[in-house]
Image (cartoon, rainbow, N blue to C red):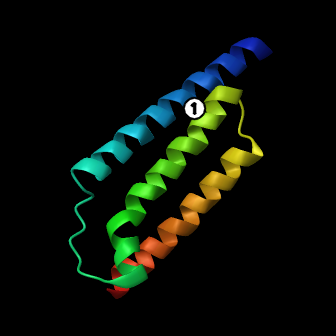
Amino acid sequence: MSERGAARRRRLLFGVGAGVALVVTAVFATVGDGVDVEASGLRGALVDYGHTVVWALLTAALGIAAATGRWEHASNALAVAAGALYAAFLVALLTA
């Protein structure tokens, strides 16, 4: 496969990933993520919005990768932030 064809394939795959992540973000933002735990303060914010923001960050990371055709530092930073936020979300959820 030529370099041009490989770049096009990467863009397509990153774009599909971004689209799927966007759909998940939209569903979580409108319908909810199915988590029904009462918490307040920072823990409450993490439980209420953390999961949705994780998927929004993943959407942005994959969108940048789709636009550039490769996984850049910005994509990596957003994905790492999503992972850290997801860990915080899980801690908040399991300790609520």
Instruction: Indicate left or right for 4 with 45 as reference.
Output: right
Q: Residue at x 79, y 16 (%)?
A: 3
Instruction: Indicate left or right for 38 with 20 as reference.
Output: left
Q: Quadrant of residue 13?
A: top right
Q: Residue at x 64, y 36 (%)?
A: 64
Q: Nearer the viewer, residue 4 or 19?
A: 19
Which quarter shows the C terminus?
Answer: bottom left
- Using the image, determine if residue 9 lies above or below residue 45: above
The amino acid type, in three-letter code, at marker 1 is Phe
Q: Residue at x 67, y 45 (%)?
A: 75
Circle 1 residue = 14
Residue 95, how many percent across, how many down? Answer: 36, 87
For label 1, the SS is helix
Asked whether residue 1 appears in the rendered view, the answer is no
Instruction: Indicate left or right for 63 with 28 as reference.
Output: right
Tally of marks = 1
Residue 93, how many percent across, how many down? Answer: 35, 78
Which quarter shows the N terminus?
Answer: top right
- Using the image, determine if residue 93 lies above or below residue 83: below
Crowding around mark 1 (Cα neighbors within 10 Å: few <14, some 14 to 19, many 20+) is: many
Q: Residue at x 35, y 72 (%)?
A: 47
Q: Quadrant of residue 43?
A: bottom left
